Amino acid sequence: MKNMMATMCLSLLLTGCGTNTNKKEEQIENKTDMKTEESQKIKKLLLDYRDALNTSDVEKVMSLYTQNGVFMASAAPTAVGTDQVKGAYEFVFSQIQLSIEFFIDEIQVLNGYAIARSTSKGSTLIHATNETVPEENREIFVLKQEDGDWKIDRYMFNKMQ
């Protein structure tokens, strides 16, 4: 009888441990799946941003920013909020035409925010001189989730060369 009770207790204990481990594994898998899904959404946002830059589409760029977004372009004043960010992109697009590709190096997601680090490479047509020059930058994006969609909240880039 004692052996039978000991065997039952041991079985229950082992079953409980196994079930708990499975739940933990499921939770980890679900978190990983969610992060992968969010990373895919963020990659799409960054590629949409690249496309908007390459077509000089101010309205498309603005649709990708939060209302209080901040744009910190290399060698330019910081643009804060919708009006300033829009004005900055209007000025940039009046001066140059980009033809770039993004290379996403890292995406970290945490509690409705994400950080993406990337590089870009391509060329820039300078409207004033009609000269095309190489373009190569590194970028950092702070992204914010709003109503289930990822938006650019802060963006900064600088030239690599």
Image: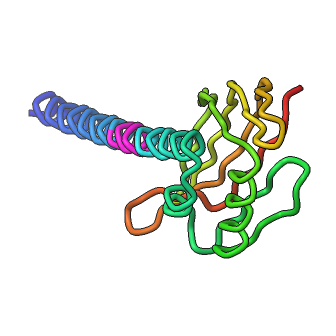
The answer to whether residue 102 is above or below residue 113 is above
Q: Position of residue 17 (x, y in %)?
A: 30, 36
Q: Main secondary structure of the magenta part?
A: helix
Q: Position of residue 161 (x, y in %)?
A: 89, 26
Residue at image position (27%, 35%) is 22
Quadrant location of residue 30? top left
Judge whether residue 111 is colored magenta.
Answer: no
Residue situated in front as seen by the camera: 91 or 33: 91
Residue situated in front as seen by the camera: 4 or 152: 152
Q: Is residue 18 left or right of residue 117?
A: left
Q: Position of residue 109 (x, y in %)?
A: 54, 47
The answer to whether residue 73 is above or below residue 102 is below
Quadrant location of residue 97? top right
Q: How is the image coloured?
A: rainbow
Residue at image position (77%, 33%) is 130
| Quadrant that contains the N terminus | top left
Q: Is residue 67 left or right of residue 79?
A: left
Residue at image position (85%, 47%) is 74
The tally of labels here is 0
Q: Is residue 10 left or right of residue 43?
A: left
Quadrant location of residue 160? top right
Residue at image position (41%, 45%) is 41
Question: Which span of residues is magenta-colored?
Answer: 30-38
Q: Position of residue 83 (x, y in %)?
A: 67, 75
